[in-house]
Amino acid sequence: ALAAVGTPSVAEAAALLAAGPGGELLVGKRKSAPPGRPARATCAVARRPAPAKGGQVGQG
């Protein structure tokens, strides 16, 4: 993950890759863990850049 997108977190790397070029990480890696238990899942959230105005198909 670190070499591919510059973050050591697989969750963050996956979110950034899904967002595509210019994607922005909104929420860093979060762990889901019951009290006193190991994490069961991790996630991160990234935003895809807004499309350029005027170049959208089907408008106009």
Image (cartoon, rainbow, N blue to C red):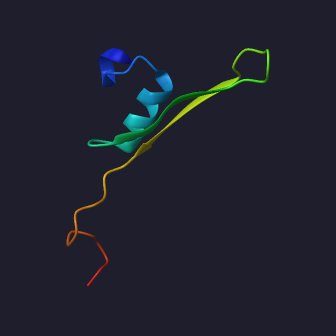
Residue that appears at 27% across and 41% down: 21
Residue 19, given in percent of the width and then of the height, sits at 38, 43
At horizontal 46% and vertical 20% (from top left) the residue drawn is: 9
Q: Name the foreground residue: 19 vs 25.
A: 25
> Residue 56, how many percent across, how many down?
27, 70
Quadrant showing the N terminus: top left
Quarter of the rendering occupied by the C terminus: bottom left
* Residue at the image point whose x is 36% and y is 49% from the top: 48
Q: Residue placed at 45% from the left, 29% from the top?
A: 12
Q: Is 34 displayed left or right of 49 in the figure?
A: right
| Residue at the extreme front | 35
**Quadrant of the rendered structure where residue 15 is?**
top left
Number of numbered callouts drawn? 0
Query: Does 39 sit left or right of 14 as displayed?
Result: right
Residues 28 and 2: in front is 28
Specify whether 14 is left or right of 57: right
- Residue 43 appears in which quarter of the rendering? top right
The location of residue 7, given as percent across then percent down, is 37, 21
Q: Looking at this view, is 30 or 51 the one in front?
A: 30
Whether residue 34 sits left or right of residue 55 in the image: it is: right
